[in-house]
């Protein structure tokens, strides 16, 4: 779409790309637009479906002059202090990628805590515990608020299958961490946990079960039940 717009717009126009795009694609598109005399601003957007009510957090990359030209429009979409020009072309989408990687880790931590509470023999009231966490605790957060909302709607989450997609940013963050030699074990584990959620019968675990049986005579569970 961006490449098509470059063919249609006039010199001096500015494209604002507010999707979740790979930073390398963004940098290529920005260079292409610049060659045509067209400004290009990449905006990482966070806020989800609540952004319409609360405003969107905007992380913006691009030429400072282009940013200043469209800043009033962007500011009208953001809550107070929720707008930042974070760097040159690509910086907005890179920052949003890191934002989503942090989100992956936070959600995975809440998910593991939820499961551990439920596995305890102490019959812990998970709803009461998570509700209390919202007030004064170190881990109080909007994601925790949303978890409590979900538990209000479905106390045992019985209507939801334990299957989680990923939309790309987590993968890109892991790829960038490898490229830049930055340790990112939490993001990697959170991403791989989502992969695992999509397997009804893991081929990797079949191999482990088979090897344990081969070297130690450990029992295996039949695929036929």
Image (cartoon, rainbow, N blue to C red):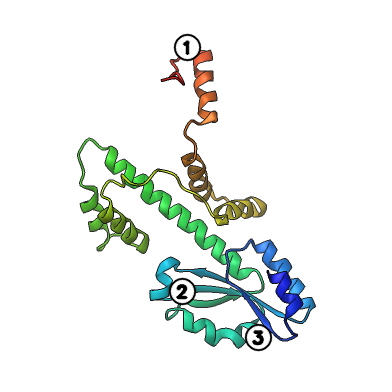
* Residue 182 seen in the current view: no
Residue 47 on image: x %, y %: 44, 68
Secondary structure beneath disc 1?
A: loop
> In which quadrant will I find the N terminus?
bottom right
Q: Residues within 10 Å of mark 3 (few under 14, many from 20)?
A: few
Quarter-of-image position of residue 152? bottom left
Residue 19 on image: x %, y %: 58, 67
Q: Is residue 77 left or right of residue 148?
A: right
Residue drawn 24% across the image and 48% down it: 126
Secondary structure beneath disc 2?
A: loop
The residue pinned by badge 3 equals 65
Q: Residues within 10 Å of mark 1 (few under 14, many from 20)?
A: few
Marks 2/3: CA distance?
22 Å
- Which numbered marker is on residue 56? 2
Residue drawn 52% across the image and 25% down it: 206
Marks 3/1: CA distance?
69 Å
Q: Is residue 169 left or right of residue 158?
A: right
Quarter-of-image position of residue 52? bottom left
The residue pinned by badge 1 equals 217
**If you read the primary sequence from the N terminus, does the residue marked by circle 2 or circle 1 appear first?**
2
**If you read the primary sequence from the N terminus, does the residue marked by circle 3 or circle 1 appear first?**
3
The mark lying in front, picked from 2 and 3, is 2
Residue 192 on image: x %, y %: 52, 43
Q: Is residue 84 above or below residue 108?
A: below
Q: Are marks 2 and 3 in contact (CB under 8 Å)?
A: no
Q: Residues within 10 Å of mark 2 (few under 14, many from 20)?
A: many
């Amino acid at each position: 779409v961006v490449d098509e717009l470059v063919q249609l717009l006039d010199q001096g126009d500015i494209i604002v790309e507010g999707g979740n795009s790979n930073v390398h694609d963004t940098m290529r598109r920005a260079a292409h637009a610049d060659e045509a005399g067209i400004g290009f601003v990449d905006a990482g957007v966070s806020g989800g479906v609540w952004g319409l009510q609360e405003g969107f957090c905007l992380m913006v990359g691009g030429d400072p002059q282009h940013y200043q030209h469209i800043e009033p429009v962007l500011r009208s979409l953001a809550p107070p202090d929720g707008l930042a020009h974070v760097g040159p072309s690509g910086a907005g989408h890179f920052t949003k990628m890191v934002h989503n990687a942090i989100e992956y880790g936070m959600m995975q931590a809440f998910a593991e805590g939820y499961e551990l509470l439920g596995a305890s023999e102490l019959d812990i009231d998970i709803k009461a515990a998570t509700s209390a966490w919202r007030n004064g605790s170190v881990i109080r957060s909007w994601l925790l608020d949303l978890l409590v909302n979900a538990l209000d709607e479905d106390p045992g989450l019985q209507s939801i299958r334990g299957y989680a997609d990923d939309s790309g940013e987590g993968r890109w963050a892991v790829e960038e961490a490898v490229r830049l030699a930055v340790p990112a074990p939490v993001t990697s584990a959170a991403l791989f946990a989502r992969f695992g959620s999509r397997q009804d019968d893991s081929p990797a675990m079949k191999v482990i079960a088979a090897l344990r049986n081969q070297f130690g005579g450990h029992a295996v569970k039949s695929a036929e039940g």
